Image (cartoon, coloured by chain):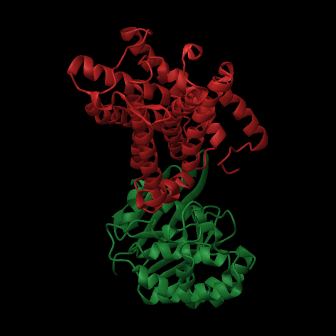
Amino acid sequence: MDLFNLPNPPLSALLSQLLLGLVNGSFYAILSLGLAVIFGLLNVINFAHGAMFMVGAVLTWMGLAYFNAGYWAMLVLAPAIVGLFGMLTERLLLRWIYKLDHLYGLLLTLGFTLLVEGAFRSVYGVSGLTYDTPDALSGATDLGFMFLPNYRAWVVVVSLGICFVTWFLIERTRLGAYLRAGTENPRLVEAFGVNVPLMITLTYGFGVALAAFAGVLAAPVIQVSPLMGQNLIIVVFAIVVIGGMGSIMGAILTGLALGVIEGLTKVVYPEASSTVVFVVMVIVLLIRPAGLFGTQK
Amino acid sequence: MSTPALEIKDLQAWYGESHVLHGVDLVVQPGEVVTLLGRNGAGRTTTLRAILGLTGVRKGSIKVNGKQIIGMATHRIAHHGIGYCPEERGIFASLSCEENLLLPPALTGAGKGMSMTDIYAMFPNLAERRHSQGTRLSGGEQQMLALARILRTGARLLLLDEISEGLAPVIVQALARMIRMLKNQGYTVVMVEQNFRFAAPLADRFYVMENGRVVEAFGSAELDGKMPVLNELLGV
């Protein structure tokens, strides 16, 4: 960051960091949303979420490099592929550990993450692959007080859209009622004649597809690399802890808010920007151990 | 003799390592109200749960309308026309009253259940509180909700676990009226009841369970003659 050499007045630096914060916050929101939904129904802390985010981004790059499939095609295809892959892993691996302690789910998905990341690393290395912004979204719009890069605006808008649709699906529809009830008491929902095992498979698929979707969005703004998920997942876990597991809207708002806090810290005191999330986590845990939106059980 | 609505033979069930049902036999004819009596831990709740596949390993035979269901996945069993009202009522906190009511899907193997209009006519309180959070309802309202939601699905065989437990006498009387009405409409009801005075006038037949077995079975006509035995077995 060579902010100091730029002739920008502080206001525009602040605004551009705010926007960057919102972009990161969008990724956080989508990822923590998926983690919260998966934890609720499967009782599994899905460490593989970061890896699925990475796979989404790398698939986007591969689509263009090998199959000439552009950004828009991969925006649909990558989540679909990762979602199907997720459903398969749920059926073959995760299904066996639901009755065990959370720790086993965490360990299993951690091991799975190492496998997936290792496989991609042996092919693509760690130096990172570049992916160009799609033509339709390149350039920037002059808002008068700042230049708004179109792609970043797109990321924020589409992420908020996806988050809203997911929230609506879960909180306001019949399908979502099954999901909420299944989170509380899966056996009873099953006794009513709902195919809960299928619902669990689909939920996991949907959760990791969300992560892959965020990965596609990230490909043009973050360097695509087999390790990009690792950097993100720890922060996202902290965000889930801050938000608390109970609420969908909580996961979304906390993700966005912490992205912004991180962005603003970069302006005020850049050295602290990578730790500020954890500082917030410590404070929240001291004051509200169940998280900002969580309910104590 | 018609096909029994429910026929259980030599049902054994386990929770993990512990063997909790040791060969339960019982038969319920269509349209009957049958009550399972017994002390806490005698295996009555477990019998209901075993029918739905909610226990661990099960052995023996469970036939619903002549169809063997013991090997089936839990989510398929309900579709043979079974409605279940669990002891803890099972009202979902994250769902509104109406969402709770709409949660159990219409059963594929069953006829049409009650319409929402009928249900709200029968339970006006639930209509009034339809937007309240499920667990904000009073105990009586939650019990009504737990019953109402299985009447919507088309289930004809109702498994009711301790529905009168912990409720005010006026609510218990309302529940008794409801059970009579359901019986008149041809529903088959299997109740687990601690409250003998609630169950006695409602049931056609009684089974008494002890240590995971049925130890006594008799009809309502024999009830008076059986009172000494019941006193001993249940301490009523």
Give the chain coloured red: A
- Whether residue A89 is visible, yes or no, is no
Residue farthest left in this picture:
A68
What residue sits 62% from the left and 24% below the top? A266
Q: Is residue A46 above or below residue A269?
A: below
Q: Point out the image quarter for the N terminus of chain B.
A: bottom left
Q: Is residue B32 above or below residue A235?
A: below
Q: Is residue B207 above or below residue A96?
A: below
Q: Is residue A71 above or below residue B153?
A: above
Q: Nearer the viewer, residue A12 or A173?
A: A12
Q: Nearer the viewer, residue A278 or A140?
A: A140
Which quadrant holds residue A217?
A: top left
Q: Nearer the viewer, residue A77 or B180?
A: A77
Q: Is residue A168 left or right of residue A237?
A: left
Q: Point out the image quarter for the C terminus of chain B.
A: bottom right
Residue B134 appears at what percent x and percent y? 59, 68
Q: Nearer the viewer, residue B115 or B231?
A: B115
Give the chain coloured green: B
